[in-house]
Image (tube, rainbow, N blue to C red):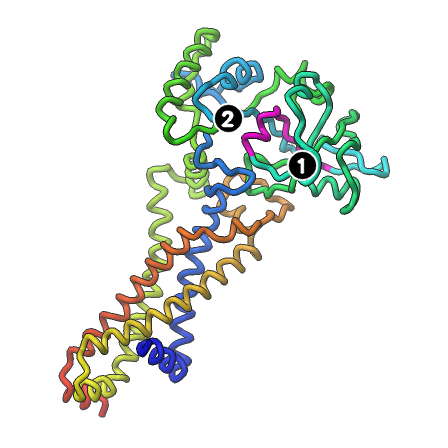
Amino acid sequence: MRYLRQALAMMREEKLYSAMYICGTALAIAFTMLIAEVYYVKTADIAPEVNRNKTYYLEYLIQKNESNATMIYWDNFRDLFQKMQTPESVTAVMDYWSSNGYYIKLADGRHDKAVKPKVTEPGFFQFFQFRFTEGAPFTQDDFESGRRNVVITEEIREVLFGKEGKAVGSTLTYKYQEYRICGVVETPSVLTEACVADIYMPASADGLLRGWGAGYEGQSYKVYLSVPDGKREAFMQELKEVEARYNSMHTDKPVDMTTSIQTHYAKVWNELTNVFNTKSDNIIWYVLPGILLLLIVPALNLSGMVASRMERRLSEMAIRKAFGAKRRILLRQVVTENLMLTLIGGFVGLCLAWTALYGWRDWLFYTFSSNLDLYGVVPILKGEMFFGPAIFLIALLICTLLNVLAATLPAWLSLRKPIVESMMIKK
């Protein structure tokens, strides 16, 4: 407690030094946390994507010995992937992300609203954990019967029925067809790319794909699979068996599924390589130097500040040594003072990072994403997206170690000087 009281007294006496030290630490933490938080949002298990650490994506099939890709169709999903035993859950989705042609009719019957539909099947709502604020998802029976039951977001409900309006049981008009609303989910953030949409529609609904071919079996799908850690080897073995069955039916165009499939982390990593326009093996040499620069440069500046301050305090230290104070006691006081300033700076830096993340969220996520469509969209940021404890603690620990070293070295060198020499320097 004595060291803490002395540190607080020092902060009151040397306000300019303390403020500069805190600001230097805060900026280092803030910039580092800002980069880390962007990728925390993209990789952490955040609702509705609560199984990112177990998710595999199969968006197309690479043909063996060729660079061409084969699309995945509904019969592939139904006959091959949906019957796999090792995944906890499997689902298929089809996205329409064009800005033209997808509209719902508003309540006045005259105006339209552009929407982003996601075509899927009942397992989608087991794979992703949506929070239903009204109603429930369409069922397997609805799907097999081709009923036009759809799930909408709260944002769409508000557009159609107002903030207090009830949606379940009502209908909406999409591509000249009437669809019954069976459920309303909390509007997902565009940052949860795998599950975000405005309307979730069953692939079997009659008339859904008007103008897109002969029916949903002719459309291309993405397959998502959730695989527990302990079953990954068994999953890859089963995937090879699925591949063999597929190739036995398509001998003219055999595919390599193990090349096509990727984990969520691999997908984010590949996206990062696209942002920096480099190969995945080189990306670490783009990111790591920047992070180290953000941490080391402030530490060097702080080291110079500490050295200058220690020169001014040499006479004080000399007098205390003359009265019997040991060098380790004096060194511990200096380290405690700087540690307190570092912790305060870390907290300020975290607040700065949160503020910048919220204020610049559209620009930040667009800059660090190669395929995220944020044109005219401000991403929704929820509380769980703001704080990754592990990331903050690692950044703070590294910054603390650098700052403590920056403070300890000049203090240790100054305290090694003889008492007489220290007193003469003061003069």
**Is 22 on the left or on the right of 70, as rendered?**
left
- Check residue 294 in the rendering and tell me which mark sits there, or answer none: none
Residue, x 48% and y 53% (percent of image)? 387
Q: Earlier in the sequence, mark 1 or mark 2?
A: 2
**Residue sticking out furthest to the front:** 1
Q: Is residue 416 above or below residue 292?
A: below
Give the percent coordinates (x, y) of residue 318. 20, 86
Q: Position of residue 64 (x, y in %)?
A: 40, 16
Q: How many marks?
A: 2
Q: Amino acid at mark 2?
A: Ser
Q: Residues within 10 Å of mark 1 (few under 14, many from 20)?
A: many
Q: Which amino acid type is marked by label 1?
A: Asp
- Pointer 2 local density, CA inside 10 Å: few below 14, some 14–19, many at least 20: some
**Residue at mark 1:** 198
- Which residue does the image show at 46% across and 55% down from the upper left? 34
x, y percent for residue 220:
58, 21
- Image quarter where the C terminus lies is bottom left
Closest to the observer: 404 or 114?
404
* Numbered circle sitting on residue 89: 2
- Name the element at disc 2: strand
The answer to the question of whether label 1 and label 2 lie on touching residues, with beta carbons closer than 8 A, is no
- Tell me if 36 is positioned left or right of 192 in this view: left
Query: Residue 222: x percent and y percent?
Result: 54, 25
**Does residue 21 lie above or below 71 as drawn?**
below
